[in-house]
Amino acid sequence: MRSLVLALLFVLIALPLEAVATHDVVSIIVPAGLEVESLDHSAVNRIFLGKTKQWQNHESIIMTVNKDKKAMALFCEQFAHKTPRQFFMYWRKQLYSGHSMLPKNFDTDQQIIDFIGEHPNSIGFIASPITDPRVKELVISP
């Protein structure tokens, strides 16, 4: 009985430590050649809600959305301040009201990386480590 209690206590102590060690984040990525190195949190939100449509060099932003459930949930929590459902409903409303076209949607992190690596003014988000030299992660300031 005593060893069962000790084992349970060990599991309860270890769980929060493991959760902290595997805290998930989403990375905002752009092509490696883009002259933008960082954005603030508000700028990311404005870009992905279609309120900012051009980079500082006046080139149009090509926004991509990652439909992977994990990446989308993390992005919405950290940047969009909406649930994934609310985010997609927002974009449907933009489309139907004639304010904007839908962003390009992809199913996986790799598809996002491939698209951004080939399109100079694009931006997107992924939930996996960046290993492709065609893209870079932006530094996001508060």
Image (cartoon, rainbow, N blue to C red):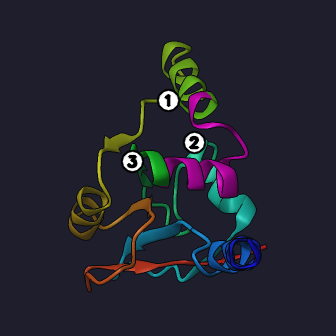
Q: Is residue 37 above or below residue 102?
A: below
Visible in this render: residue 139? Answer: yes
Instruction: Tell me, yes or no, whether the two marked residues, 1 and 2, touch with CB atoms within 8 Å.
Output: yes
Q: Which mark is residue 50?
A: 2
Q: Where is residue 101, by image quadrant?
A: top left
- Asked if the stretch drawn in magenta spans residue 133, the answer is no
User: Does residue 2 appear to the left or right of 133 in the view shown?
Assistant: right
- Whichever of labels 1 and 3 marks the residue nearer the N terminus, that label is 3
Q: Secondary structure at mark 1?
A: loop
Q: Is residue 93 above or below residue 25?
A: above
Residue occupying the point 69% across, 72% down? 4
Q: Quadrant of the C terminus?
A: bottom right
Q: Residues within 10 Å of mark 3 (few under 14, many from 20)?
A: some
Q: Which mark is residue 100?
A: 1
Q: Is residue 89 above or below residue 54?
A: above
Instruction: Name the amino acid, label 3.
Output: Asp
Q: Position of residue 53 (x, y in %)?
A: 53, 49
- Whichever of labels 3 and 2 marks the residue nearer the N terminus, that label is 2
State the separation of the CA atoms marked 1 and 2: 7 Å
Q: Start and end of the magenta stretch? A: 71-85
Q: Position of residue 3 (x, y in %)?
A: 70, 79
